[in-house]
Image (cartoon, rainbow, N blue to C red):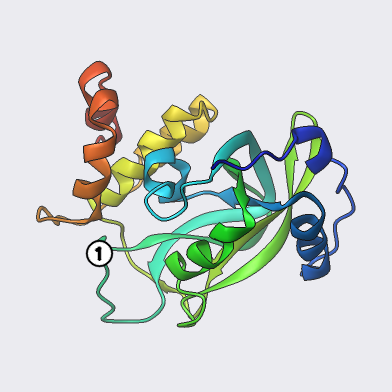
Amino acid sequence: MQCQCKYNQLLKVFVFKKQNNLLITMLVTTVGCFLYFAFGSNLLKERLHLANPTATFVSTGRLKDYKLNFGLWGENVTTRWHGGVGTIEYSPGAEVWGVIWSLNNEDLANLDSQEGVKDGFYTPLTVSVETDKGPVVCRTYQMNNFYATVASPQYKEVVCLGAVQNNLPDEYVTRLKAVQTNNYTGPSLRDQIMKKVKKIITTHTIPQKCNET
């Protein structure tokens, strides 16, 4: 069952206070779901749905004064992506574009688990995301103990697919396509995701474009 949150209901929560988890709690309690701002592989609906099937698109949005980085939560870390993954870093004047998803309460634990919250990989943040209908308070995640590491081509491809799928600004997509990658060519989480997006691959040339550097 997908989340039935109404966009107008969600936009009632305009007041933003940094790290104000009470706002997120109130939103979950009041309308039965929460808003999540995705900027990495979870830009792609099919990737997010692997563990969070109630996620539904709300809007694209811009997180001001943050930049997108790729890395891991320490040296010599091995992941299913075989390279760095996305995180956000405070950077005045910068911006990160992404997708706002609404998820049922039942998926909150799933999302936290995917982001490795209990293991200390990521920390949940409450952020104010700019949309064409005004600012929206969302949950997002920031990596702990950040160690810069280049992404794998597979991770970059999924991020680019999600950016194109949700019509993020062309200039921002171009920046994503310019992200440098490592030389990993083996199996990864991408393989499982691509089974779900086979139709996209066969009707668009997105994967090839996303691999351009």
Q: Residue at x 25, y 64 (%)?
A: 80
Compared to residue 172, the image places residue 84 above or below, namely below
The number of discs equals 1
From the viewer's side, name the closer residue of 88 and 25: 25
Provide the residue designation for mark 1: 80
Q: Residue furthest left?
A: 186
Q: Residue at x 27, y 45 (%)?
A: 193
Q: Is residue 208 visible?
A: yes
Point out the image quarter for the C terminus. Answer: top left
Residue in front for this viewpoint, 85 or 112:
112
- Is residue 58 found left or right of 211 in the rendered image? right
Q: Position of residue 135 (x, y in %)?
A: 80, 42
Q: Amino acid at mark 1?
A: Arg
- Would you say 111 lies left or right of 192 here? right
User: Residue placed farthest to the front in the image?
Assistant: 1
Q: Is residue 87 left or right of residue 36?
A: left
Residue 17, quarter of picture: bottom right
As helix, strand or loop, the secondary structure at mark 1 comes to loop
- Where's residue 191, x and y in %? 19, 47
* Residue at position x 63%, y 58% in the image: 105
Where is residue 14? Give x, y as percent.
87, 47
Q: Quadrant of the N terminus?
A: top right
User: Is residue 10 shown above or below 36?
Assistant: above
Residue occupying the point 82% across, 68% down: 22
Residue 213 in sight: no
**Relative height, residue 157 to residue 188 (above, below):** above
Q: Label 1 crowding class (10 Å Cα cut-off): few <14, some 14-19, many 20+?
A: few
